[in-house]
Amino acid sequence: MSGDVEDAYRAHWAYVLAATVRVTRDLDLAEECAQEAFAQALVVWPRDGLPQQPAAWLVTVAKRRAVDVLRREQTLRAKLPLLALPADDSDKSDISEKPDHRPDGSPDDRLRLVFTCCHPALARDAQVALTLRLVCGVATPDVARAFLVSEATMAARVTRAKKKIAAARIPFRVPRASELPERLDAVLSVVHLLYTSGHTAASGPELLRADLTGRAVHLARMLHRLMPDEPEAAGLLALVLLLDARKETRTGPDGRLLRLDEQDRTRWDRALIEEGRDLVLRALRYRGARPAGRYLLQAAIAALHAEAPSFAETDWRQIVELYDGLRAAWPSPVVDLNRAVALSMADGPEAALREVERLEGDPRLAGYHYLPAVKADLLDRLGRAAAADEAFRAALALTANEAEREYLHGRLSRHRPDA
C-alpha cells in the first residue's frame, strides 16, 4: 500500500465505512465497497495526485460502488434493513446529535457504528472484536492477540457477529440514554483495547501506532462528553491521557525502547497529566458508594506513575494495593502479571518470581510474550544469568515488534556478547 493510501486508511477507514453503511444498510457490502475505494486509490492517486480531500474522495467512490451494486440487485428496499436510519434521517434518541460528515470529526456516524457493534444481542467478546475490526481498523491477528485466542477463532467470531447483526436487523443509531448502561462496558473495552493495540504495536518497526492511540483518545473524549457523570468513562479517558502523556519518551532518538526508569520525565506532557489526574479525582468523588471499576483503578495507577518525581520515588506499595483492587474488579492473568512487576519493586524480585512462575501454568498466557519477558527481567535482577537468557529467548520467539525485539536482544547481549 502506498504511503498516502496507507495514511488515509489509518485516518479515515471508520469514517468511510460509516458513511457507506448509510447507503448499503449492509455491513458486509459496506466493508467491501470501502475496501474497493481504497484499492482504487492505489491506482488513481499515484497517477493523478493526492486529492485535496482524500476522505471525501474515498467516501464518494465507495458510495458510487455501493449504488451500482444495489441497482443491480433491483432496489435498496430489497436489502435487509440493517443499520437503517428512518427515511427522514430523524433519530428520536434523546442523546443523538446531528450528523457531522467532516472526516476529522464525524462523531455521530462513528458513535452509531460503535454502539451498533456493541449491541447486547451479540456475545460480549463478539461485540468488542467486531468493533475493533470494523470501526477501528485493527487487523484480525492483532484483535486475536488482545483476546489471547487464535486468529482463526477471532475471524470466526467476527463473521458470526456480522451475520447476527444482519439476521436481527439491529438498527444503526446511537442508543437512548436508558439503553446506554448495558452497552457501556463493551464500548469502554473497545476503546481501551484500541489504545493498547496502538500503545505497543503487535508487529512492525515502530513501538507506537499513533493513529490507533489518537483514535482511542478521540473516542474516549466523546464517550466522556456523552456520559459526564459515569466514573468509568472518566476513568478510561484519564487512563489514556496519562499514558499518552509519556509517549514521546518511550523510545530514544535511535528508536531504542526505553524502560520507565530510563525515561526523561521532564518531557512528559504535564497538561495531559493534570487533566488525567483531575478526572481521576472527580470520578472518585462522584462514584458514590460504588466501588472503583477497572478503568478508574488503572487510571489511578497511571497517575501514581505520572506524578512520581522519579522512578525510585514511585509509591510501589500503593500501586500493589491498587492492583489488588483491580484483580477483584477485573480478574485477569494479565492484571496478575502487571501486579507481579509492581510487587518486585515493593518486595523484591524473589517474591514476584513466585507469582510469575504460578502464572506460567495459566494456558491463557501461553503465547503472551510479556510473561517470559517479565520472568527474564526478574531472573536477571536475581543474578541468575543462564535462566534469564533462556527466558529472554522464549520472549523473543513470541515477539514481532521490532523495537521490543531489539530491546530483548540488548538484554541478552549483556550476558552473551555473541547473542
Image: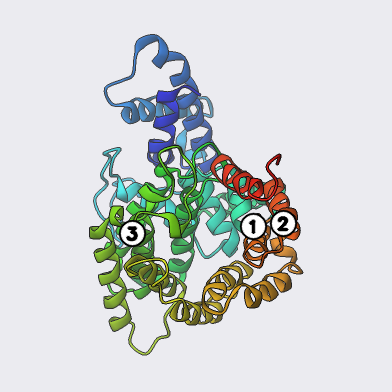
**Mark 2 and 1 residues: CB-CB less than 8 Å, in contact?**
yes
The furthest residue to the top: 47
Name the amino acid, label 1: Ala
Q: Quadrant of residue 265?
A: bottom left
Question: Which mark is on residue 241?
Answer: 3
Which residue is disc 2 drawn over? Answer: 391
- Disc 3 marks a residue whose amino acid type is Leu
Callout 1 environment at 10 Å: few (<14), some (14 to 19), or many (20+)?
many
75 versus 360 height, above or below:
above
Q: Three-letter amino acid code at disc 2? A: Ala
Label 3 SS:
helix
Q: Give the side of residue 232 with respect to residue 72, left or right.
A: left
Residue 124 place in picture, x, y as percent: 57, 64
Q: What residue is at 68 percent from the left and 42 percent from the top? A: 417
At x 59% / y 72%, what residue is drawn? Answer: 340
- Disc sitting over residue 373 in the figure: 1
Most foreground residue, 57 or 89: 57
Q: Position of residue 332 (x, y in %)?
A: 61, 71
Q: Nearer the viewer, residue 396 or 328?
A: 396
Mark 3 nearby-residue class (10 Å; few <14, some 14–19, many ≥20)? many
Q: Residue 151, can we see it?
A: no
Q: Position of residue 387 (x, y in %)?
A: 75, 60
Q: SS of the residue at dot 1?
A: helix
